[in-house]
Amino acid sequence: MPQLQPNRAASPVPPGLSDLLASGDEAYERGDRIAAHSAYRDAQRLDANDPGLLSRLGLTLTLVARDELKGIAFCEEAIRRGGEEPDALWRLSVVYLATFQKDRAIRAMRRGLQLAPTHPKLLLAIDGMGIRRRPVIPFLSRSNPINRFLGKLRHRLAPPKVDEET
């Protein structure tokens, strides 16, 4: 059965949608999550199907309105409709972290970094996670002095890659 491609046909953008999204993004960046949520809600009245809006609204639904199920559903639907876009994957990872789904968050971050290796928010998020590599000698404990020494040496010689397993 053929795979359905996301509908990426250019539909006319309702007047004011871009302004509301920019206003919401600006409010989110300065830490005013409530104002961002309000701007995204207003934008939803103009175009409830825009993938970028669904992703943003899913983020604030989770963080502001504490509606975790809808937040996850909106973020996942945004990716289904608009394709895998690094900003959408970053928002999905934030939602997963907020709902205590660390494994899913890490997968979303890694996928986003595969698409955009220099995406600043994704890089900051994955660095903040403190993801560790497997011990050099797996049958020894992580705290074993040999593993610690070899781990430091490995880190100096070959810094971890984004897609490396933990």
Image: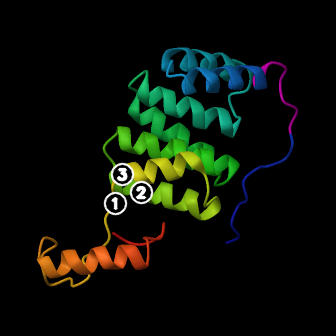
Closer-to-camera residue (33/81): 33
Q: Are marks 3 and 1 in contact (CB under 8 Å)?
A: yes
Residue at the disc numbered 2: 106
Q: Nearer the viewer, mark 2 or mark 1?
A: 1
Q: Disc 3 residue type?
A: Met
Q: Position of residue 138 (x, y in %)?
A: 20, 82
Where, quadrant-wise, is the N terminus in this rendering? bottom right
Residue at the disc numbered 1: 131
- 104 left or right, relative to 43: left
Q: Disc 1 residue type?
A: Ile
Magenta residues, dominant SS class = loop
103 up-or-down from 76: above or below = below
Q: Does the rendering let one see residue 79?
A: no
Q: Nearer the viewer, mark 2 or mark 3?
A: 3
Q: Are marks 2 and 1 in contact (CB under 8 Å)?
A: yes
Q: Earlier in the sequence, mark 2 or mark 3?
A: 2
Structural crowding at the residue carrying mark 2, measured as other residues with C-alpha within 10 Å and reported as few (<14), some (14–19) or many (≥20): many
Q: Which residues are magenta?
A: 11-17
Q: Position of residue 11 (x, y in %)?
A: 86, 37
Quote the CA–CA distance across marks 3 and 1.
6 Å
- 55 left or right, relative to 16: left
Q: Disc 2 residue type?
A: Ile
76 up-or-down from 150: above or below = above
Instruction: Give SS at disc 2.
Output: helix
| Picture residue at 47% right of the left edge, 27% below the top | 61
